[in-house]
Amino acid sequence: MTTTTTLPTEERVVRREALYFAVRNTKLMIGFGIVLFLLLVGIFGPILANVEDPNEYVAAAMLPPSSEHWFGTTTFGQDVFTQFVYGLRTTFVAGALGGGIAAVIAMVIGFVAGYRGGWVDEILNMLTNVVLVIPTLAVLLIINAYLGIRSVGVQALFIGLTSWPWAARSIRAQTFSLRNREFVDLARLSGMTTRKIITREIAPNMSSYLFMTFILLFGGSILIASSLDFIGLGPTEGVSLGLMLQNSTQWSALQLGLWWWFVPPGAGITAVVGALYVANVGLDEVFNPKLRET
């Protein structure tokens, strides 16, 4: 009876303590603030742009930034601000889907391998090593050549299926260190199944670590998606920040002095990924008492 009343109280104390340090952590607030601002721009920016098609020709070519066209226009008369806000939305979608798929795969493999051990761990570890050494760029080239599928969903699926190994290894190591703790032994003796032990006992004790892992996978997926778009292996329809960089390079924006075409997407990618990593450092300081600023 005492256990059931004290545990929720202890959890509330831990949550309040984490929230107390979180709102006072400058890195965390700045990082998440930048990400939230750019996310809102990606969601509501198309309403401000008042243009349904980001590739529509709306004005004269190569106009510099002005009150009418905030980020100027391209060599074809497309509004760069409109492309930027639509590109932000696509970039966030690709990062969230790719990072989410990678996180789910990493958690399933990491939890099972770390808890079960033995031959199960060996098989899953072998699978992790195989995926780790797969030449992802060559595989993507083959997929594009034979299937011709170039959508954001397929791109995110490919990123998720190839970027989980390092996270699975980290989760496996954490699970391995927790599986012999007293609370796990008690759950095992009470007759809990493996799935319930992992989801109810081990995973909650790793919730902060799992959240930080997802942030890293999210940022990594954005970088991979932008890189694929830049080299011409991304979606052919719509617009993304990486595709904006690819188009500006292809049509000699740097040589023509059209800095307003390639600076916004480059700055957007840098800001999102950089802010995610800064926020992750802040979270590490919040969850790790040894790193907290006094």
Image (spheres, rainbow, N blue to C red):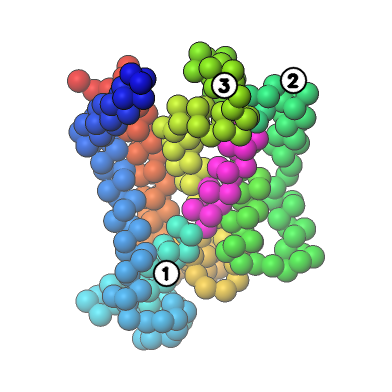
* Residue type highlighted by circle 3: Ser
Which one is earlier in the sequence, the residue at label 1 or at label 3? Answer: 1
Rendered location of residue 191, percent (x, y):
61, 24
Tell me how far mark 1 sits from mark 3, CA to CA.
53 Å
Q: Residue at x 73, y 32 (%)?
A: 124
Report the front residue among 269 and 174: 174
* Residue position marked by numbered label 1 in the rendering: 86
**Pointers 2 and 1 in contact (CB under 8 A)?**
no
- Looking at the image, is mark 2 or mark 1 nearer the viewer? 2
Rendered location of residue 66, percent (x, y):
25, 75
* Residue type highlighted by circle 2: Gly
Q: Secondary structure at mark 2?
A: helix
Q: Secondary structure at mark 3?
A: loop
**Disc sitting over residue 190 in the figure:** 3
Tell me how far mark 2 sits from mark 1, CA to CA.
48 Å
* Residue position marked by numbered label 2 in the rendering: 118
Say whether residue 105 is magenta: yes
Q: Secondary structure at mark 1?
A: helix
**Disc sitting over residue 242 in the figure:** none
Which one is earlier in the sequence, the residue at label 2 or at label 1? Answer: 1
**Pointers 2 and 3 in contact (CB under 8 A)?**
no
Q: Main secondary structure of the magenta part?
A: helix
